[in-house]
Amino acid sequence: MEPLDGSNLAAIAALCRRGLADPPSEAELGDALLAPDQPAQLFGDPSSGVVAVAECEDGPHLRLLVVDPDARGQGRGHAAACAQINIEFQD
């Protein structure tokens, strides 16, 4: 999974509009994923699926997992979540 950053926010917001029933705005995503006191690690491909995990006092928390409707049923969400969990536990 490729690492992503704030420069991908518009594309992630577009993915959320395609993949979520009640998608957050780009500003809400920025607040949730790029908060200076608790930034999330972002991975994936904004054209098909993204996962975001933030390290909290009690361990990693999944902030976002969204898969494009056309990419569902191919195991991308599962692979994204598992890859991120493995990264978190290896660090």
Image: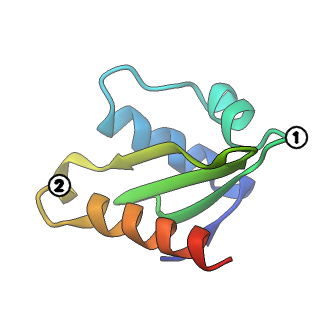
CB atoms of marks 2 and 1 within 8 Å:
no
62 shown above or below 78: above
Q: Which mark is residue 54?
A: none
Q: Nearer the viewer, mark 2 or mark 1?
A: 1
Q: Position of residue 75 (x, y in %)?
A: 19, 66
Point out the residue furthest to the front here.
Answer: 58
Q: Is residue 63 found left or right of 68 in the rendered image? A: right
The residue carrying mark 1 is: 37
Q: Which quadrant would residue 79 be assigned to in this image?
A: bottom left
Q: Residue at x 49, y 43 (%)?
A: 64
Q: Which quadrant would residue 72 be assigned to in this image?
A: bottom left
Task: Give how far apart the Cα atoms at labels 2 and 1 are.
Answer: 33 Å
The residue carrying mark 2 is: 72
Point out the residue furthest to the left here.
Answer: 73
Q: Position of residue 31 (x, y in %)?
A: 74, 31
Q: What amino acid type is highlighted by mark number 1?
A: Asp
Q: Residue at x 68, y 42 (%)?
A: 33
Q: What amino acid type is highlighted by mark number 2?
A: Arg
Point out the residue furthest to the top here.
Answer: 22
Q: Is residue 34 found left or right of 81 in the rendered image? A: right
Q: Residue at x 57, y 25 (%)?
A: 25
Q: Position of residue 73 (x, y in %)?
A: 11, 58
Q: Which quadrant would residue 61 be assigned to in this image?
A: top right
Q: Position of residue 48 (x, y in %)?
A: 34, 60
Q: Is residue 5 found left or right of 86 in the rendered image? A: right
Tell me the crowding category of disc 2: few under 14, some 14 to 19, or many 20 or more residues within 10 angstroms, Cα based. some
* Nearer-N-terminus badge (2/1): 1
32 shown above or below 39: above
83 shown above or below 23: below
- As helix, strand or loop, the secondary structure at mark 2 comes to loop
Name the quarter where the C terminus is drawn: bottom right
